[in-house]
Image (cartoon, helix red, strand yellow):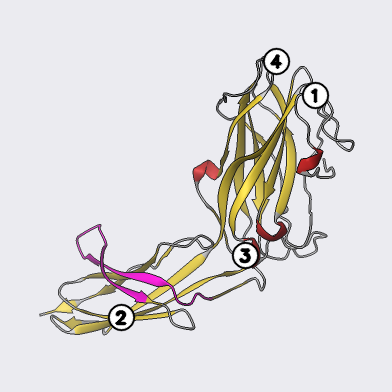
Amino acid sequence: MSRVAVPPGGRRSGGGAVAPSVAAAPVAHSEPARRVASRGAVVGTVAVLLAGAGASAGVAAGDPAVGGVTVNGGRDVVVGTTHDVRFPVTVTGADGSGLSFADVDLKGPHGGFYTTDTFCETATACTTMFTVNAHPAPGGDDPVDLSNAQAGTWSVDALVSTGDGDSHFAPGAGTFALKRAARLTVNASPEPVAKGARITVTGKLSRANWDTYRYAGYTGRSVRLQFRPKNSGTYTTVATAKTDGTGSLRATAKAVKDGYWRWNFVGTGTTGPAKAAGDYVDVRP
């Protein structure tokens, strides 16, 4: 079921009516909700899942309380350019008559917006599944979800209704990071190499461009060069290099023993982390 999104100013708590265009009592849903606000809007689907309980203080007795919001299990949401990314948003709360319905708004930088509603599976929790993407949907009527400017910190507003018709609006009940996916490549040479000689390790850091639906070099970023001996499961940082104007990386190191070389990027506030697969170098006496 789709319905018009209500601006935060249109919400009221403690009563049955929340806005002229939205009824306080839940209406039966025959299929998942899907909605677009603008070119940068986040579009997706919704499903109801069982979730845990929660409660909050500071609300008068008898009023429904939003205890908190958990997005994607507390992990960042990282989106590339080819696949939809699906993640849960769980609203927890408490009321004497039990929670019955929840309306969830996700709000991001530069107009990023997604809203949906769902019945609660338990008296204390309701979970919706959001699906976002940064690639065109062939044959679809909806525009692409995301633009580059919308990467960063998003907030979550929650409106809960109860079994006795009461309601409570909790703006900014939670936050999460929506980030552009990153990729790393690596090549260590020469292979094989004499012990004590120097090897050159190159690579490239790129990240998803949500405006062009491609990956492009990520410039001016520090990336760790790491080594793992042949019979070890642990990588150790041996140097740090910065990407050039195309996102390329280059460093040299002494070849001491057989093992794997890789680049490791920890990510930024708008871009997810990335690790290259280790490139094995055979060191000969």
Does the magenta segment cover residue 233? yes
Residue bearing mark 4: 97
Residue bearing mark 2: 251
Mark closest to the chain's N terminus, 3 or 4: 3
Q: For the residue marked with disc 3, what is the amino acid?
A: Thr
Mark closest to the chain's N terminus, 3 or 2: 3
In the rendered image, the residue lying farthest to the right is: 20
Q: For the residue marked with disc 4, what is the amino acid?
A: Ser
Q: Nearer the viewer, mark 4 or mark 2?
A: 4
Which numbered disc covers residue 82?
Answer: 3
Secondary structure of the residue carrying tag 3 is loop
Q: Residue at x 53, y 63 (%)?
A: 181
Spatial CA distance of label 1 from label 3 is 44 Å
Horizontal side of 165 relative to 253 (left or right) equals right
Q: Quadrant of residue 118?
A: top right
Which numbered disc covers residue 191?
Answer: none
Label 2 packing within 10 angstroms: few (<14), some (14-19), many (20+): some
Mark closest to the chain's N terminus, 1 or 3: 1
Q: For the residue marked with disc 2, what is the amino acid?
A: Ala
Q: Position of residue 16 (x, y in %)?
A: 82, 24
Secondary structure of the residue carrying tag 2 is strand
Mark closest to the chain's N terminus, 4 or 1: 1
Q: Position of residue 135 (x, y in %)?
A: 68, 65
Q: Residue at x 69, y 28 (%)?
A: 120
- Part of the protein shown in magenta: 217-241
Does the magenta segment cover residue 122? no
Q: Quadrant of residue 212?
A: bottom right
Horizontal side of 194 relative to 121 (left or right) equals left
Mark closest to the chain's N terminus, 4 or 2: 4
Spatial CA distance of label 4 from label 2 is 64 Å
